[in-house]
Image (spheres, rainbow, N blue to C red):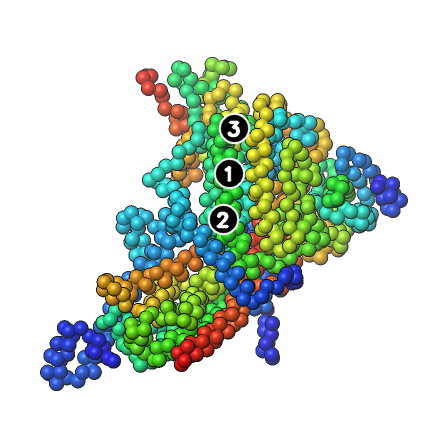
């Protein structure tokens, strides 16, 4: 499936007009994808601003506080915009002993892959930028990249806290990738395809995967490991404020810090959106438009992740690794086995 | 207790007086460590406080050992010269004597012989003088 | 680095027990989010209601004649632990008839310990309700007698 | 922790004086092998204000507000230790009502301090929400202080021979309300933290302080009681009216961070019990004994020991008969706990270091003086 195949009617007519000139369809395709990518990027950035506001509101509610309530009205909707503006105007500091090139490059290496994965998120029945044949594999490959950026940032800062944070990020990122992939494998087995479109249609036909045994287990595994992937409490060791000050981004200021921060929330949005895609039937749902259904499910997942983040303490590094290797990996293997048995039976 | 102590330490105990729950001893520096060890063996295991008092005419270092079982105190006073004084360290008897001895050194200038790590503790390393001596004036009065 | 020997639970019980304990915590935070009131005070918009005992900025009381009750007896200055009462001057009268003409109180030195108030034999000063003593310089934290004197009562000249 | 033939190097990490979990301006010079702490050298004194020197240049009464600034989380216990020593030298006794009021103030301070402990300890372990819950409950105590003494943190309301003022009307009712409110809230903390598996694996068995080592380092208070030594000055050397009040000396044999945490949680419940007894038994009468304005106690010395929320806070006062003390020694419990820290953290990881430091509940104001 290409972009054109999923395009709405207006686009179809545009394409007809395009081909009437004798121009090749693949150029149209390429232009269309660039436009879509820009739209998705803009959408994700706006979402991140909203998510940061939401996180502060949720934590405020949980902690008997009010949260942002001044900027832009009673509920402070423009608070994050104001914060972003503040960060933009901050002095940009590169530490004297830093490895400048790596230091500058690191935030982008974290930021770009977290945006790239949105290419395969089906926001609605019509809005899937590129339904790759190996969609799931693409996600696995690309979402593993940010860890490299974290390690680079931590290393280049020439700061011991940042270094420790980077080492933790690497160890944790690698370990949790495995149960995460295994949880996705269960979905691939169930859907019989790595293609996102097939996974969605498999759920439309046979019911959401979360309702079908044993994918509930895979769902839980995905949720837990994705919390670790986005470095949130109880898995926030790479940042671990009370231990490492700010972990790998200790030395980052202003806009460079903001990019790390935005990437983190974009990643959070992605894991929730992808969770919806894999287990909650993506955009399917009655009455309301598909895109709305997709967002409702995604935000439900995000709220759960936030709720957990504001409740539990942090684990220690060896406990985190133990949790991944002694509990999640075996559990994931068992789930894969069960899924295989159920689906071949 | 007093009799036992005198039998053990001998004439290095200059005076001994029981005030309420406190046994106040005045000891010569030579007998300090032996005296502390003697007390520790008899249940005074809690080194509540080590400090110094400069009265303007004489200076003494005061060790307060407490028995957690009986609640009795032994208060050992040892006279030291006001400048350049030194005493044997009791860190070998009580681990908890480490920091208080450093503090007494820091603020009064008493050197503790045998202390594992005698540095300034509250003041900066390059501080001149010992501020709790009466010879050091307070800035404002 | 020894871990005290505890009874080892079975693997599954440990996992489920752990999940249950976290679930209880989640219930607590949810309850707080939904049921408990917000306790934050919205400061500039919402001012605290201070109790009468509040120890804030020093206030010089006026006598029945409207003049300060302070007789410049220096008792407060002697009692002050931090030399926060910088200067007291009285007029040329003697004893109880004397009245303060100058009185400088340094808010930046004050510990608000109330000892000056307790030392005053004429009940002439108190620590009042004003808590905001912001200044842009050290000089600005010194308050003169005129700034400390309580407002004249209604109907008096 | 070297892997195979890969050579590893130890790293010296300077933690503090600006760091989120050093509870003030403390600096730890750490030697790390990867994540593992192999050496720890606490560097203190950043908050040194020369309190003991100041005391020699102030009158007895004038020094009281200074003592508030030592252990600023529970200022009343500092006042109490100093006042106790002065009263012993001068042979003054506070009227019975004042003694009860002092106990109420001290125990409210203890609860406030322990709430801050629970809050900051949870925060050190990244349980941010428990942090705000602790401060939320503490705020009620602050309001009580404000209502009675006019100050929230540094009350300096324990005076030589009494207390600064009698409790205002309505205080008893509000105090009772608080006592009733706190119990269920503590149960909530138990659900949120104490039972939480993550909290447990982070604290159980971590930072073990064997009882004999604790005594040798002169540790006291919840730190020592968390190692199973039932040493509480309110029992061992009762001051004020503690001998007339019923309460348990809480101990825990775990010797680890969890033990110290549990002791403090239970002590809050005991303190509520003490406050309720005081409110019920509160006699009528004066709250301030007659004390000469220029107090000149006879020459001599006295040692005032108080069970502060952190442990034994003691004040050694030597008088030469003048209006100012000849020597005031402030014996701060956190100072001794800090000295024991290097031994407790050796071999543990960075994350544990933060937990162990948090479990000692240090206040730099009293360490540095």
* Badge 3 and badge 1 in a common chain: yes
Q: Is residue B96 above or below residue D72?
A: below
Q: Nearer the viewer, residue A167 or A278?
A: A278
Instruction: Kindly identify which chain the residue marked by label 2 belongs to.
Output: D
Where does the N terminus of chain B fall, quadrant-wise? top right
Dot 3: few (<14), some (14–19), or many (≥20) neighbours within 10 Å?
A: some
- Residue tagged by mark 2? D188
In primary-sequence order, the first of circles 2 and 3 is: 3
Mark 3 secondary-structure assignment: loop
Instruction: Kindly identify which chain the residue marked by label 3 belongs to.
Output: D
- Residue tagged by mark 3? D167
Tell me where residue B141 appears, x and y as whole percent. Answer: 58, 34
* Badge 1 and badge 2 in a common chain: yes
| Gap between marks 1 and 2 measured at Cα | 14 Å
> Closer to us: mark 3 or mark 1?
1
Tell me where residue D341 appears, x and y as whole percent. Answer: 63, 55
């Amino acid at each position: 499936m290409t972009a054109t195949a999923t395009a709405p009617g207006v686009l179809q007519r545009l394409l007809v007009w395009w081909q009437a000139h004798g121009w090749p369809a693949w150029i149209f395709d390429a232009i269309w994808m660039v436009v879509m990518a820009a739209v998705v990027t803009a959408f994700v950035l706006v979402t991140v601003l909203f998510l940061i506001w939401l996180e502060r509101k949720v934590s405020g509610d949980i902690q008997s506080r009010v949260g942002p309530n001044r900027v832009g009205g009673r509920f402070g909707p423009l608070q994050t915009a104001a914060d972003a503006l503040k960060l933009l105007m901050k002095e940009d500091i590169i530490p004297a002993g830093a490895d400048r090139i790596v230091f500058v490059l690191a935030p982008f290496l974290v930021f770009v892959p977290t945006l790239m994965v949105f290419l395969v998120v089906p926001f609605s029945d019509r809005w899937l930028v590129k339904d790759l044949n190996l969609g799931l594999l693409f996600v696995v490959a690309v979402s593993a990249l940010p860890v490299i950026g974290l390690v680079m940032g931590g290393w280049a800062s020439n700061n011991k806290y940042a270094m420790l944070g980077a080492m933790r990020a690497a160890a944790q990122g690698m370990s949790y990738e495995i149960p995460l992939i295994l949880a996705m494998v269960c979905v691939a087995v169930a859907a019989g395809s790595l293609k996102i479109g097939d996974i969605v249609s498999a759920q439309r036909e046979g019911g959401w995967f979360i309702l079908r045994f044993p994918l509930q287990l895979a769902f839980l595994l995905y949720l837990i490991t994705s919390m670790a992937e986005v470095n949130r409490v109880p898995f926030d060791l790479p940042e671990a404020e009370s231990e490492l000050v700010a972990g790998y981004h200790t030395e980052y200021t202003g806009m460079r810090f903001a990019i790390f921060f935005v990437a983190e929330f974009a990643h959070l949005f992605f894991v929730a959106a992808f969770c919806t895609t894999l287990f909650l039937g993506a955009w399917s749902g009655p009455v309301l438009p598909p895109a709305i259904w997709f967002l409702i499910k995604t935000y439900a997942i995000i709220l759960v992740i936030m709720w957990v983040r504001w409740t539990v303490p942090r684990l220690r590094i060896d406990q985190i690794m133990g949790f991944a290797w002694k509990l999640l990996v075996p559990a994931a293997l068992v789930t894969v086995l069960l899924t295989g048995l159920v689906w071949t039976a | 207790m007093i009799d036992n102590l005198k039998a053990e330490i001998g004439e290095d105990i200059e005076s001994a007086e029981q005030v309420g729950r406190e046994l106040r001893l005045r000891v010569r520096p030579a007998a300090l460590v032996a005296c502390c060890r003697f007390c520790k063996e008899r249940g005074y295991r809690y080194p509540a406080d080590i400090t110094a008092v400069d009265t303007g005419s004489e200076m003494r270092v005061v060790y307060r050992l407490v028995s957690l079982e009986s609640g009795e105190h032994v208060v050992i006073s040892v006279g030291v010269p006001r400048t350049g004084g030194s005493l044997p360290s009791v860190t070998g008897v009580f681990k908890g004597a480490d920091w208080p001895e450093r503090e007494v050194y820091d603020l009064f200038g008493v050197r503790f012989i045998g202390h594992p790590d005698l540095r300034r503790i509250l003041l900066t390393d390059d501080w001149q003088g010992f501020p709790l001596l009466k010879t050091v004036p307070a800035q404002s009065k | 680095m020894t871990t005290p020997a505890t009874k080892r639970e079975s693997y599954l019980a440990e996992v489920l027990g752990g999940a249950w304990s976290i679930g209880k915590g989640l219930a607590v935070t949810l309850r707080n989010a939904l049921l408990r009131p917000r306790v934050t005070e919205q400061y500039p918009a919402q001012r605290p209601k201070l109790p009468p005992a509040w120890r804030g900025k020093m206030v010089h009381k006026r006598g029945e004649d409207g003049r300060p009750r302070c007789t410049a007896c220096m008792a407060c200055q002697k009692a002050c632990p931090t030399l926060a009462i910088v200067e007291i001057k009285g007029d040329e009268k003697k004893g109880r008839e004397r009245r303060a003409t100058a009185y400088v109180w340094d808010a930046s030195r004050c510990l608000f310990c109330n000892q000056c108030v307790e030392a005053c034999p004429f009940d002439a000063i108190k620590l009042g309700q004003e808590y905001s003593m912001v200044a842009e310089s050290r000089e600005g934290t010194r308050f003169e007698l005129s700034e400390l004197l309580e407002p004249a009562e209604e109907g008096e000249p | 922790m070297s892997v195979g033939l890969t050579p590893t190097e130890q790293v010296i990490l300077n933690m503090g004086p600006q760091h989120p979990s050093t509870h003030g301006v403390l600096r730890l010079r750490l030697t790390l092998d990867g994540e593992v702490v192999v050496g720890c050298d606490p560097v203190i004194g950043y908050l040194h204000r020369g309190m003991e020197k100041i005391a020699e240049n102030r009158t007895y009464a004038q020094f009281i507000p200074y003592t508030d600034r030592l252990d600023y989380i529970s200022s009343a216990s500092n006042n109490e230790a100093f006042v106790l020593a002065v009263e012993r030298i001068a042979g003054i006794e506070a009227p019975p009502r004042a003694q009860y009021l002092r106990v109420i103030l001290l125990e409210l301070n203890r609860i406030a301090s322990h709430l801050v402990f629970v809050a900051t300890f949870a925060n050190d372990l990244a349980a941010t929400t428990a942090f705000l819950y602790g401060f939320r409950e503490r705020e009620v105590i602050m309001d009580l202080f404000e209502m009675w003494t006019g100050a929230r943190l540094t009350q300096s309301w324990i005076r030589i021979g009494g207390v600064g003022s009698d409790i205002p009307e309505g205080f008893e009712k509000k105090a009772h309300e608080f006592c009733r409110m706190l119990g269920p809230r503590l149960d909530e903390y138990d659900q949120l933290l104490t039972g939480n598996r993550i909290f447990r694996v982070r604290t159980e068995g971590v930072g073990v302080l064997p009882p004999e080592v604790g005594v040798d380092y002169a540790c006291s208070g919840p730190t020592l009681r968390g190692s199973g030594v039932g040493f509480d000055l309110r029992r061992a050397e009762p001051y004020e009216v503690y001998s007339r009040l019923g309460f348990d000396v809480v101990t825990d044999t775990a010797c680890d961070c969890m033990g110290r945490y549990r002791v403090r949680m239970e002590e809050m419940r005991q303190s509520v019990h003490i406050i309720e007894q005081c409110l019920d038994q509160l006699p009528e009468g004066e709250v301030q004994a007659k004390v000469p304005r220029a107090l000149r106690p006879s020459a001599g010395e006295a040692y005032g020991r108080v069970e502060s929320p952190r442990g034994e806070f003691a004040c050694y006062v030597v008088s030469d008969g003048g209006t100012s003390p000849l020597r005031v020694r402030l014996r701060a419990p956190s100072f001794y706990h800090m000295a024991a820290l290097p031994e407790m953290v050796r071999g543990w990881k960075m994350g544990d270091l933060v937990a162990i430091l948090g479990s000692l509940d240090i206040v730099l104001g009293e360490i540095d003086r």
